[in-house]
Structure formats: C-alpha cells, structure tokens
Amino acid sequence: MAYDAELADRVRAVLASRRGITEMRMFGGLAFLVGGHMAVAASGSGGLLLRCAPEQTAELLAEPHVGRFEMQGREMTGWLRIDDGAVSSDDDLRRWIDVGVSYASSLPPKEARVSPRRRAAQPTA
C-alpha cells in the first residue's frame, strides 16, 4: 500500500516553518527527518509512524488509536503506529508531530552518509 499523500501534505504543512526538516522514503512511506533521525512518517500502512522517547512509549500507548510499531514481528520501543483516527484534526496531527520532532531533535545529528557508488565516483586527493 502506498502512503497517504494527503496525510503527507498535512505533515509537510505543519513542518513548513521548521528548519532542518528533510524528507526520505522509508518503511514504505514518506518520512520526515530532523538531523538525519526520523521524527514522523506518513506510513505505507496508513496513519503515522512516530518516534518518541523510549520512556514515553507506555504512556502514549494508553491513548486511543495508538499501537506499537512492529518490525519483522518485533515490537519496537520508542516507535509508535498512530492510526488515522488520532490525527483527524490539525491540532491532533500537530500534537503527534511535536512528539516526534521533539524526540528526534534531542538526538545528536547523524553524519551524512555517502553511498558506495558515490564514494567510488569521488576523486581521491
């Protein structure tokens, strides 16, 4: 399933005034990154995929329309799946985005990676 382009546009609109946000296709959706760390994504399975502080996971799971994100059958602490019902209003969407951006912003920036093909094409000094 392709990600919800309308939801991605809503996320993009909320993040438009923030600096340092990049977009990347990942996990079958469209992710929005801060300092190279995924904050939130319009998921290919519908709704949002969201990063949060690991210690915040249990508290956020108690909210309606929120579940753990699973990768290869393993539940991931600090990663949540937010169903469409939790982001129907712009205020709700903004709240969830703030959770993800806040956590991703707290992490040290990742160094830019160069693909092996690009590295091989770069001249040596």
Image (cartoon, rainbow, N blue to C red):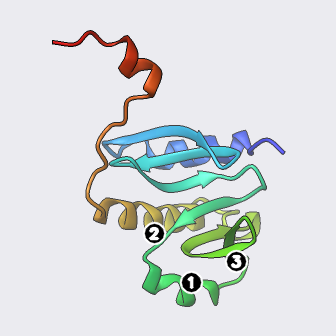
Image quadrant for the C terminus?
Answer: top left
Image quadrant for the N terminus?
Answer: top right
Labels 2, 3: front one: 3
Identify residue for label 3: 67
**Seen in the image, is 95 located left or right of residue 37?**
right
Q: Nearer the viewer, residue 30 or 122?
A: 122
Residue 45 place in picture, x, y as percent: 78, 55
Indicate the secondary structure of the residue bearing disc 2: helix
Distance Cα–Cα, label 3 vs label 1: 9 Å
| x 44%, y 64%: residue | 98
Q: Give the amino acid at mark 1.
A: Leu
Q: Quick check: 52 above or below 113?
A: below
Identify residue for label 2: 99
Residue 86 place in picture, x, y as percent: 69, 70
Q: Give the amino acid at mark 2.
A: Val
Q: Which mark is residue 60?
A: 1
Q: Return the disc, 3 or 1, that comes first in the chain's sequence.
A: 1
CB under 8 Å between callouts 2 and 1? yes
**Seen in the image, is 59 located left or right of residue 89?**
left
- Name the image quarter holding residue 22: top left
Indicate the secondary structure of the residue bearing disc 3: strand
Q: Return the disc, 2 or 3, that comes first in the chain's sequence.
A: 3
